[in-house]
Amino acid sequence: MTEPPIFQPIFSIEDPSFSAYESIFSEPPQNYILSREGLHFQNSFEKLLSAGNNFKLFLKVSLSWMLGEIEMSEGLNFPILKILQKYHVIPSQVYLEIADSVSVREFESFSTAVELFKEVGFKIVLDHIGTTSNHLDRLAAVSPDIIKINIRNFGKMIQTREFLSMIEYLKDISGGLGADLLFNGIEDEDELFLALDTGAKFLQGNLFCEPLEKISIASQSTELLGSYIESFHIKKRKQISKEIHFEASICELLAKQNIHVRYTEKKVLVDVISLFKISPNIMRIYVTDWEGTQVSAYYERNSENGFQENQINLQKNWSYLPFFYKHVKQAYRNPTAWQISDPYWDRELGEKLIVFSKILERQFSIFIDVSITE
């Protein structure tokens, strides 16, 4: 017999009235067994309908189950659609949650199966993203509606800089695919703030509500989430205010400097002594041409009051770096102002940096790497 399902609520940041639940049962079948998996789905819909029909249901399914549905159907009339019709549920209310690893040989079958289920209206959730490279490959084959990140799968890694970089990467991917992020396994306020800071639209975890046998979310859960979100906004605004103050102070110091530059046939010479003196946070200085090729030495701080001049990077091209063409775009808008990049993690220095840049004469640009004080 199939154990009755329990339900983990899923909350939406965008829409407080969003009602969604993940149906959880102890041992999801890996092979296609209509009687067992079908009974589980029926139990799920039956319980949810007792709470009303305005809900979304997340169901964990395997690739073999999807292929079994396709093999046993005529056209797109999948067996699960009969269950949905019985309980007056439409496919767009159902999110099929796929966590399988997919081999190279299965890839075509996987992408075809997903497209067929999407065609009849089901939503697709890709789970366990980021835990293996194979899961990243699935993103290229499928445009999911939701990318699910289970924080518990990463253990102590969530405290590392590498994890934060990976989450930023997934944030960019989800934006490019038009998918929403769902963070699962949230158990404390720090994990919640990480999810919110990364752009999560959906949240799931015991911090808000433990799995339920019956669908009856107390209003306290929604109120608790609301209070946490308000705390996040307060913290975030303080952080932004601090960042703006720091950036403005550096810009003010740079604006007071007359940057002395001499041009030779082979390179540009910069008087960087005064620039390094204005702030201990200034770590590097260099000049490029309009195409991003470095035309000056690479000046690097090596002590509190000293720096070294490195010629190795001369003629290297830095236009591939994300801040370069952002600098070009901003320079077109305001060629006389100092431009500021987004923060990034510098592996060599082991610090978070922002880049201040400005157009010099002859369409050369000066770039100043500045360590962020925290």
Image (spheres, helix red, strand yellow):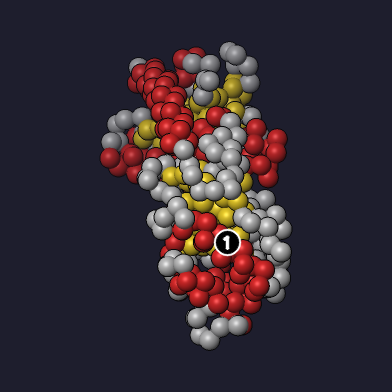
The N terminus lies in which quarter of the figure? Answer: bottom right
Residue picked out by circle 1: 43
Above or below, 24 relative to 264: below
Question: Quarter of the image holding residue 161?
Answer: top right
Identify the residue at horizontal 33%, vertical 39% (top origin): 331
Residue 27, given in percent of the width and then of the height, sits at: 71, 58
Q: Nearer the viewer, residue 330 or 362?
A: 330
Question: Quarter of the image holding residue 30?
Answer: bottom right
Identify the residue at horizontal 54%, vertical 48% (top origin): 214
Residue 348 shows up from this direction: no
Residue 166, given in percent of the width and then of the height, sits at: 60, 44
Residue 172, given in percent of the width and then of the height, sits at: 49, 49
Extreme left residue here? 333
Extreme front residue here? 50
Extreme bottom residue here? 74
Q: Is residue 133 left or right of residue 229?
A: right
Residue type, mark 1 in image: Asn
Q: Is residue 155 left or right of residue 48?
A: right
Residue 309, given in percent of the width and then of the height, sits at: 59, 27
Identify the residue at horizontal 61%, vertical 63% (top origin): 40
